[in-house]
Image (spheres, rainbow, N blue to C red):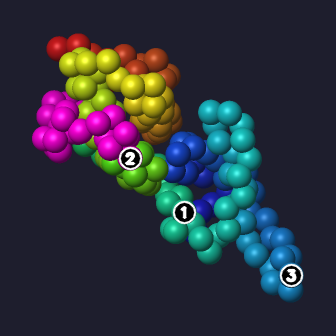
Amino acid sequence: MFNLNEFVFYPSYGVGIIECISKQKIGSVDISFYNVKILENNAKIMIPVKNEQEVGLRQLIKENEIQKVFDVLEARCIKNPFARKESWNKRFNGYNIKLCSSCLFDVAEVLRDLYILKAEKELSFAEKKMFEKAKHLIIKELSTVMHRPETFVEDKIKRIFVQ
């Protein structure tokens, strides 16, 4: 159970804050909802409390896990050796599953792999959008947890791949 004003991560949308926990009657059943405001675009999402795990709603990572995200980015190897040879749409489908997961480390793998591929060849339009989305999700969550500006985190990520 999450609390009022708690930051949460909602897959594909990113970091949000629980503005309230409301009840609505649907048919003859009272259902409790988290009313989450997504920080990036102020979108409001209602998530049934009983479905929080099924939809991947989770707390933000802990400060002691931040380095693990950077370790994934610094690994500098694509775990799937066939990723370079597969067509963009096969890579896209595999990466999309990771991107929509609630695991920030999976999102970091997507960003790392696309950074590596981007250095080797032109990304497809869909891969470019996926690259930007993965980068955004990581930057937003890390900057929120670290209490630092997004530009600080973005610069730190760029430095990893410029070396």
- Image location (x, y in percent) of residue 84: 19, 33
Q: Residue at x 65, y 70 (%)?
A: 49
Residue in front for this viewpoint, 16 or 46? 46
Q: Mark 3 points at which residue?
A: 27
Q: Is mark 3 on a helix, strand or loop?
A: loop
- The amino acid beneath tag 2 is Asn
Q: What element carries label 1?
A: loop
Q: Name the residue under label 1.
A: 55
Q: How many marks?
A: 3
Quadrant housing residue 109? top left
- The amino acid beneath tag 3 is Gly
Vertical order, 62 against 128 (above or below): below
Vertical order, 24 against 80 (above or below): below
> How far apart in space, not on screen, are marks 1 and 3 (Cα)?
23 Å
Q: Which mark's residue is nearer the viewer, 2 or 1?
A: 2
Q: How crowded is mark 2: few (under 14 residues within 10 Å), some or many (20 or more)?
A: few
Residue in front for this viewpoint, 80 or 44? 80
- In the rendered structure, the answer to whether residue 56 lies left or right of residue 21 reads left
Mark 3 and mark 2 lie on one chain; the one further toward the N terminus is 3
> Is 78 inside the magenta-drawn segment?
yes
Q: Which residue is drawn at 79% across and 65% down?
A: 22
Q: Name the residue under label 2.
A: 93
Q: Give the range drawn in magenta.
A: 71-93
Q: What element carries label 2?
A: helix
Residue at the limit of the structure toward the front, as seen here: 87
- In the rendered structure, the answer to whether residue 150 lies left or right of residue 64 reads right
Mark 1 and mark 3 lie on one chain; the one further toward the N terminus is 3
Residue in front for this viewpoint, 66 or 37? 37
- The amino acid beneath tag 1 is Val
